[in-house]
Amino acid sequence: MYDLKISGGLVVDGTGEPPRHADVGVVGDKIVAVDPELPGDAARTIDASDHIVTPGFVDVHTHYDGQATWDDLLEPSSGHGVTTVVMGNCGVGFAPVRPGTEEWLIQLMEGVEDIPGAALSEGITWGWESFGDYLDALDGHSWAIDVGTQVPHGAVRAYVMGERGARNEPADTDEIARMEHIVAEAVSAGALGVSTSRTLAHKAMDGEPVPGTFAATDELFGLGRGLRDGGGGVFELAPVGSAGEDIVKPRSEVEWMRRLSAEIDQPVSFALLQVPAAPDLWRELMEVSLQAVEEGAQLYPQVAGRPFGLLAGWQTSHPFMRRPTYRATEHLGIEARIERLRDPAVRAAILSESDGERRGGMHEGVGALVARMLDQLYVLGNPPDYEPRPDRSIAAIAAAAGVDMAEAAYDAFCAEDGRALLMVPLFNYVDGTHDVIREQLTHPRAVVGLSDGGAHCGLICDASMPTTMISHWTRDRSRGEQLPLEWVVRKQSHDTAALFGLNDRGVVAPGKRADLNVIDHARISLQTPRLVHDLPAGGRRLLQHADGYTATIVAGEQTRADGVDTGARPGRLVRGRRAA
């Protein structure tokens, strides 16, 4: 007798093989049978007729490091078919930590990943020092999905070097040896990898780049040796040039990554985006990644499934944030504020004004950035379209209406009852199409990532990217070639799991972990992101729900039914790599 049987579905098993009709039998937390006509009774049956059945998705680039200590649901990711997340990316995290420096780590995370510091301060209950202690603390939690983590270079450097490390001063031989030892201990305790950041776009709240941004190669190789000696894992990084601030150095970055991977015999995964300053550079870096394979290295460019940018609107950041009449509405709740902003007299006043004095803060800074990029602003729409046509740009809308772009943007923000969001695609949309993204996704060394789940709470909601992959790339795309369903499923299940050595999941096959999705492929779609204030201390974040997930199953237990949380919490900490 099965604990669970999923019957009559079209199984897209994660291997890349063509879909096939089959039943799936589950006992405990394991898949025990996959067969066209599975005999035997089950304690519970899910009818998957006219649905697809996939492995649970594995998202390898998230930032739930703080949220995982207080939140057992881990949205947005858990609502988009994701059953395992990997956090601790980009060199930031909360262990190791010297007692008394907890607030500094919070400020670092807030500055780099735009997670409200007040929410982290109120939400995290500290009680660890070493990375192993942190894992032990996480081990006391259960979630709707599984959680794995990496040891962050920034925290390690500050722990070893104190203020000198935080200020990015050079590390000496002894300090590098101590960092190497900490990484080895962390990986031995269960960290899935080590991460670092080398992009100037990543800064703490005090404006200081992430510790390790300017680290010499001997320090980076020390981290790599610790990774190897602790048992192995992924060396993950945001490299120089990943945010477009330097268009020359990425070539030398890939060179040391290639040497490091070959020396330690471990995979190196680095963020790769198309940057406007050098729109073809990513192709060269992809080619170098292929060449590295011939030299014994394992380089995996980490790419996104849609444009990488910001969402602007009355709920988030926008170009009018510094105008006096707008500032006079800031004390109002969102409903009252939107009502005021839709008043023609208020509209006319705001559009006639110049910006007032800048008060500082990330979101006001983003508003100023959007003001400078009105010609690159697109109406996202409802349902959201992450590959908008040129006629949905504010520049085109303004030209068609015979108004200036500020007027067109203001009116676009007022759509959808004042909750419309517009997209500013900073990267991966230089030519206004997804063709570059398609080429990146289909590169043989590319791994799907960069969702930043749990981060940039008031600016993006890219944790919904797995749903975009299934809906847009396999069904909805009309501006170019789509991608095969079985290929897209493999990219975000088997391939992402395999990169981190999680070989017990990511495929629908007997013996594998019963992490599964039952999806109405004809209906799966995204809703418009909405701003909520449900983080500790009333912190705000964007959530984006999806339709079409009939069931999500983690370790044999159903955690979502028609997109609604069931309350089941079978998710656990994933310690270390897993055999098949």
Image: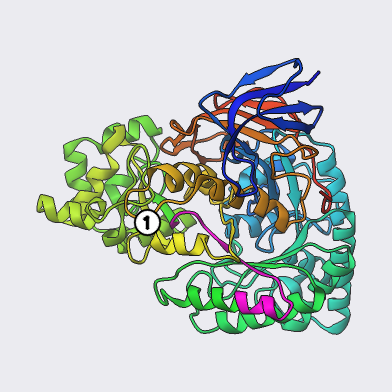
Q: Nearer the viewer, residue 566 or 480?
A: 480
The colour scheme of the drawn protein is: rainbow
Residue 379 to residue 272: above or below: above
Residue 217 to residue 460: above or below: below
Q: Is residue 150 magenta?
A: no
How far across and how far down the image is residue 161, in percent? 81, 73
Q: Is residue 567 visible?
A: no
Q: Quadrant of residue 340?
A: top left
Q: Tag 1: Cα neighbours inside 10 Å, few (<14), some, or many (≥20)?
A: many
Q: Residue at x 22, y 43 (%)?
A: 411
How far across and how far down the image is residue 447, in percent? 60, 59
Q: Residue at x 83, y 59 (%)?
A: 98
Residue 46 to residue 433: above or below: above
Q: Residue at x 65, y 39 (%)?
A: 56
**Type of amino acid under label 1:** Val
Q: Residue at x 88, y 62 (%)?
A: 231
How far across and how far down the image is residue 529, in percent? 44, 39
Q: Quadrant of residue 251?
A: bottom right
Q: Is residue 540 left or right of residue 227?
A: left
Q: Is residue 300 magenta?
A: yes
* Highlighted magenta segment, given as a residue range: 289-308
Q: Is residue 426 left or right of residue 92?
A: left
Give the residue at the far left of this rendering.
402
Residue tagged by mark 1? 424
Q: Nearer the viewer, residue 94 or 122?
A: 94
Q: Is residue 361 left or right of residue 260?
A: left
Q: Nearer the viewer, residue 313 or 560?
A: 560
Residue 335 to residue 13: above or below: above
Q: Is residue 36 left or right of residue 481?
A: right
How far across and how far down the image is residue 503, in percent? 77, 50
Q: Secondary structure at mark 1?
A: strand
